[in-house]
Amino acid sequence: MALIQPDPTFYPSAREAMLAPREELAYVALLDAAGQGRPDALATIDLSDGSITSVNDMPVAGDELHHFGWNVCSAALCPYAPHPHVERRYLVLPGLRSSRIYVFDVKDDPRRPRLVKTIEPETIFEKTGYSRPHTVHCGTDAIYVSALGNVDGDAPGGVFTLDHDTFEPKGRWEADRGPQELHYDFWWHLGHDTMITSEWGTPNQIEAGPSLDLLVGRKYGHRLHVWDLTKRRHLQEIDLGDQHQMALELRPAHDPTKTHGFVNTVVNVEDLSANIFTWYHEDGAWKAVKTITIPAEPAEADLLPEPLKQFGAVPPLVTDISLTLDDRILLVSCWGTGELKAYDVSDPLAPRETGSVRIGGIARRDPHPAAPGRALNGGPQMVETSRDGRRVYFTNSLYRSWDDVFYPDGISSWLAKVDIADDGSLSLDPAFFVDFAADGRRAHQIRLQGGDSSSDSFCFP
């Protein structure tokens, strides 16, 4: 009788995952810069030298691929998981504009993924009532997908699930959504049977680009929502303050015994700062407190795009964060100022900055050591950290219509790498620079072969 072994890339705890072999490949979503006529793509990168081993064009144009993820992860080892012997072999890619989802198989030839299934938007509309799938996370019982709005592009947005085996939509996740309407990201505390969700805006609010009227009117999202993960019921709303517009990426502690995590807000409309909040559980309730503030940087008006000229400053525009598996270092991408920051969050309520690097930026256009004479646009945006917490990979495109407002000369895209030292300081790898200029498409989400710091969740401390 053959012995069934779990996928070797599954780890019971984050501590064991940190001892995993070093990542060899990265998978990167490439977005059509012009937004017309050319399909998006999935690129595979050899991380030993930064070479591109393959580029898979999607079958049709207009998807705007976003935060893709694995079909299953280490959560499959949870004692109550009904799928403990599935394989981490499929990448699930959501098209944010098209509402189409692609499934790629990377098992047979990891350097050349193969498209094996397409879920058409009409199927998602019919079975979930949602549209604009944005983020994919692998859960214990299904593949979870966030969606920014309903079929008409309005509220409510929420979460739907896909079957682990067939990838068919199972339906809307929420049984009782309470006051929740806006949606963006979601993650969970498996050890506490709790899901957290965040807010950006409806598709109709965001697809044309950022709206100054909506910002001034404080109409974008600024709340967290707490849910009972098993009963799928809304438990609590946490308002971060309506001046803190766009509460985006959620990074809960990887240790399932802990109840804290971090969320970034993109811009404070009162001073253009960006902020990080720490959420935590205390005295029977979930709470959040602002723990990091990153101020705007003064800049000459002629270096600024039209919406910022009147302010004479560049907002940091923190658009992504990443937490190392030991819950010690939080990486923060400042897409506006072109800075990647690191904070020691061993005390989650008192972060301490430990490192910073500069590349790109709205006003600065800092070069990379591999291309010293080239002024780079874009800035650190999507961030992914290796399982051992030693390397950080990041790309420079946010969302096409928003790229074009803040970087109106167009983003020439790249992928860079930073090394994290023992003390949390950062240094750009001078030899690693993947240039997508010849391809012409823009790099966005990154996933690392075998798993990474923002795709796995664990049931054991």
Image: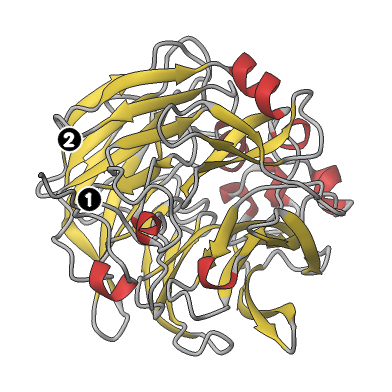
Q: Secondary structure at mark 2?
A: loop
Q: Is residue 366 among the parts visible in the rendering?
A: no
CA gap, disc 2 and disc 1? 15 Å
> What residue would you read off at disc 1?
7
Amino acid type of disc 1? Asp
Q: Camera-side residue: 110 or 421?
A: 110
* Residue 434: percent from left, percent from top: 23, 42
Q: Is residue 199 above or below residue 191?
A: above
- At 33% from the left and 46% from the top, the residue drawn is 447
Callouts 2 and 1 close, C-beta under 8 Å: no
Q: Quadrant of the C terminus?
A: bottom left
Based on the displayed image, in which of its 4 quarters is residue 437 positioned?
top left
Q: Secondary structure at mark 1?
A: loop
* Residue 22: percent from left, percent from top: 15, 59
Q: Is residue 7 above or below residue 169?
A: below
The answer to whether residue 43 is left or right of residue 65 is left
* Residue 368: percent from left, percent from top: 27, 54
- Badge 1: residue crowd in 10 Å (few <14, some 14–19, many ≥20): some
* First in sequence: mark 2 vs mark 1: 1
Q: Quadrant of the N terminus?
A: top left
The answer to whether residue 13 is left or right of residue 350 is left
